[in-house]
């Protein structure tokens, strides 16, 4: 008898791929041949032993550990979900994010002198002059520069990131405000932009598109 | 089950990271077990199993949603373990030792005043012995034996996971069985 052939049959049997005919032949052989019987028994026993150790479990904190190690950039949906569930806080966050995002960038971007346009204002280098004897009507806003008030201003004067000099003859009928810190700058915008923000809130509901813009603002900075 | 997994994958693809936690829950024991039996070391197994899930997540866009997710995940985990085994080959016997000390760690976690029932000690010793013998198998036989007898996967699934012809899988299983027969006959 061919033992090698019988060993091949044993493996076919263990893989459950043996034909009925070959299986019969194998069984008959195993009853007669001690050597093959032992071989087959050892195969079955060793596989039973291997199977017997198959009950190990992952550590209890496994999933938490995996989740904490995932890359963070896909948190976007999580934020959107959060926003949907907290509409009021969303409004507040959106407000802050938009304010911080756009205003900080504006603050940093505007380094050049800018001034509201009134025909009788004189601009010399970084200095804006309200000439002596002239009356400037309307509010004046000066950014990144100095204002010398020698004449009269009929309105408010706002100086952002700059300085003011009042001549003795100078006169401002409205308020004079100096905005030199970033938070004041934001506050200034909050007050002047309040109406636009209210409109924004009204449009916000249910629009994830606009949320996306808001959400991604912080990552830029 | 397959339907739930597909649904969660679609959520993950949309960027919903939390949906991935459920996928990890479903497969964590299987993948951890695969890594543990391949590497014979609990600590390494945890590292590799975590790495497998992280890689699957990072590469989820390259997963074909019409295929079986478990096959793909098993492939990632198996390849990671095989790479690991190949890298540490010079330390092979050292690691076999580590497999044994894992059982000792289990003893030391038992409070001193309580003693393990004798049969439980025997069972732990037997498990360590079996694990050590599996660890001695060349990696190509070890892989198919673990997939077939520990993970209880079909030959066809194993062939897909390893991207290997069915005939090769069968040959390796036969040789792996023969090797284990000799190693475990006197246990
Ligand atoms: Zn025989």
Image (cartoon, grey):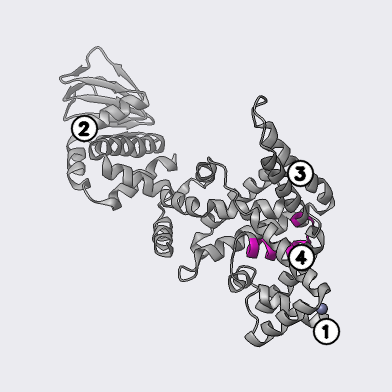
- Looking at the rendered structure, the secondary structure element under dot 3 is helix
For residue A125, above or below residue B16: above
Q: Nearer the viewer, residue A66 or B160?
A: B160
Mark on residue A42?
A: 4
Q: For mark 1, what is the residue?
A: A2
For residue B56, above or below residue A173: below
Q: Quadrant of the C terminus of chain A?
A: top left
Residues at marks 3 and 1, CA–CA distance in whole angstroms = 40 Å
Residues at marks 4 and 1, CA–CA distance in whole angstroms = 19 Å
Q: For mark 2, what is the residue?
A: A192
Q: In terms of image quarters, where does ligand 1 lie? A: bottom right
Where residue B18 appears, as percent x and y from the top left, is 42, 48
What residue is drawn where x is 77% and y is 57%? B86
Mark 2 in CB contact with mark 3 (< 8 angstroms): no
- Mark 3 against mark 4, which lies toward the viewer? 4
- Relative placement, left or right, of A196 versus B130 is left
- Looking at the rendered structure, the secondary structure element under dot 2 is helix
Labels 4 and 1 within one chain: yes
């Amino acid at each position: 008898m061919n033992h090698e052939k019988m060993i091949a049959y044993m493996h076919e049997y263990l893989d459950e791929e043996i034909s009925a005919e070959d299986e019969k032949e194998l069984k008959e052989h195993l009853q007669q041949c001690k050597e093959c019987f032992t071989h087959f028994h050892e195969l079955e026993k060793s596989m039973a032993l291997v199977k017997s150790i198959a009950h190990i479990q992952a550590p209890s904190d496994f999933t938490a550990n995996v989740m904490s190690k995932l890359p963070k950039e896909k948190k976007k949906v999580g934020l959107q979900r959060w926003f949907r569930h907290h509409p009021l806080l969303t409004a507040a966050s959106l407000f802050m994010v938009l304010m911080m995002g756009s205003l900080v960038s504006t603050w940093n971007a505007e380094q050049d002198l800018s001034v509201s346009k009134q025909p009788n204002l004189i601009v010399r280098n970084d200095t804006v002059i309200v000439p002596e004897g002239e009356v400037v009507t309307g509010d004046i806003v000066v950014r990144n520069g100095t204002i010398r008030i020698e004449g009269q201003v009929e309105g408010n004067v706002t100086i952002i990131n700059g300085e003011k000099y009042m001549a003795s003859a100078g006169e401002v009928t409205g308020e004079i405000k100096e905005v030199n810190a970033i938070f004041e700058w934001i506050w200034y915008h909050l007050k002047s932009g309040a109406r636009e923000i209210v409109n924004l809130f009204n449009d916000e509901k249910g629009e994830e598109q606009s949320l996306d813009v808001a959400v991604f603002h912080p990552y830029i900075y | 089950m397959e339907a739930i997994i597909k649904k969660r994958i679609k959520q993950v693809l949309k960027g919903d990271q939390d949906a991935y936690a459920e996928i990890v829950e479903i497969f964590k024991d299987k993948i951890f077990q695969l890594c543990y039996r391949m590497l014979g070391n609990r600590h390494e197994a945890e590292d590799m199993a975590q790495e497998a899930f992280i890689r699957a997540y990072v590469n989820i866009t390259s997963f074909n949603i019409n295929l079986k997710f478990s096959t793909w995940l098993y492939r990632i985990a198996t390849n990671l373990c095989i790479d690991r085994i190949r890298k540490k080959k010079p330390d092979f016997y050292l690691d076999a030792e580590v497999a044994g000390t894992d059982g000792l760690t289990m003893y030391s976690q038992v409070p001193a005043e309580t003693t393990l029932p004798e049969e439980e000690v025997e069972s732990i010793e037997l498990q360590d012995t079996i694990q050590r013998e599996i660890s001695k198998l060349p990696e190509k036989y070890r892989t198919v034996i673990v997939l077939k007898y520990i993970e209880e996967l079909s030959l066809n699934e194993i062939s897909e996971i390893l991207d290997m012809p069915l005939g090769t899988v069968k040959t390796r299983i036969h040789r792996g069985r023969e090797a284990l027969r000799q190693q475990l006959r006197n246990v």
